[in-house]
Image: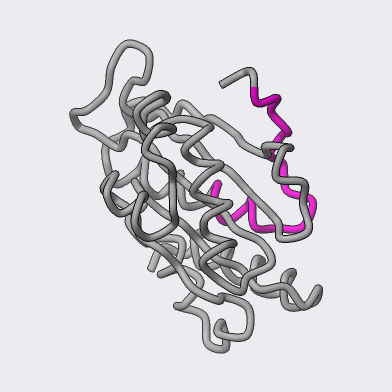
């Protein structure tokens, strides 16, 4: 596995283990890369609670309870959907912190508003205020499918760190 992903996963496990926190990933465009990186590390099971690969819209609805209206209104690649995915990851697990990632890895599927390389992230904590959305949007550009997915996984892992860099987004800005 990619050494940079393994190093990031190790940091996530060590930092969350020190806090006694369990983590869950809810992944779309990364297809489980975050979960794979975390589980590549021996002993991860005391921190990594589970991962959801919700690649299709149906999977987002069924596995983590994203509301159909949110998907239809904002689209799968949106702060609203990423936030719903993160919240759903907490609801459907015993984890303390969730990260969600949804995006357009290409080579097709992009639009003028959401070009290839657009990836949306959200982080939610069990003790957090569900009305305060913590999310980030990255525009990686058309780096190629594999590199967009790798970069997205690195950002998602970073968001699982204590004091991670995602910013609260007022719900009205979606």
Residue 164, magenta (yes or no): yes
**Which x, y percent locates residue 42?**
52, 87
Range drawn in magenta: 155-171
Quadrant of the rendering where the N terminus is positioned = bottom left
Coloring applied to the structure: one colour
Given residues 118 and 75, the one toward you in this image is 75
Q: Quadrant of residue 51?
A: bottom left
The residue that appears at 30% across and 37% down in the rendered structure is: 105
**Which x, y percent locates residue 99?**
56, 54
The residue that appears at 51% across and 66% down in the rendered structure is: 92
Q: Farthest left residue?
A: 108
Q: Quadrant of residue 48?
A: bottom right
134 left or right of 68 in image? right
Residue 12, magenta (yes or no): no
81 left or right of 157 in image? left
**Which x, y percent locates residue 34?**
46, 61
Q: Farthest bottom residue?
A: 43
- Residue 27, above or below 3: above
Quadrant of the rendering where the C terminus is positioned = top right
The residue that appears at 40% across and 24% down in the rendered structure is: 73
């Amino acid at each position: 596995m990619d050494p940079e992903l393994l190093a990031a996963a190790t940091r996530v496990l060590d930092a969350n283990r020190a806090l006694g926190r369990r983590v869950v990933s809810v992944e779309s465009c990364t297809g489980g890369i975050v979960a794979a990186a975390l589980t590549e590390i021996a002993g991860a099971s005391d921190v990594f609670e589970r991962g959801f690969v919700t690649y299709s819209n149906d999977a987002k609805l069924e596995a983590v309870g994203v509301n159909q209206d949110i998907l239809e209104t904002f689209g799968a690649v949106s702060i609203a959907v990423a936030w719903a995915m993160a919240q759903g990851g907490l609801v459907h697990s015993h984890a303390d912190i969730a990260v969600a990632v949804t995006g357009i890895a290409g080579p097709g599927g992009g639009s003028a508003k959401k070009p290839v390389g657009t990836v949306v992230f959200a982080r939610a904590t069990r003790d957090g205020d569900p009305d305060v959305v913590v999310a980030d949007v990255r525009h990686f550009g058309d780096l190629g499918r594999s590199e967009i997915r790798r970069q997205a996984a690195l950002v998602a892992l970073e968001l699982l760190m204590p004091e991670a860099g995602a910013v609260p987004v007022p719900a009205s800005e979606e």
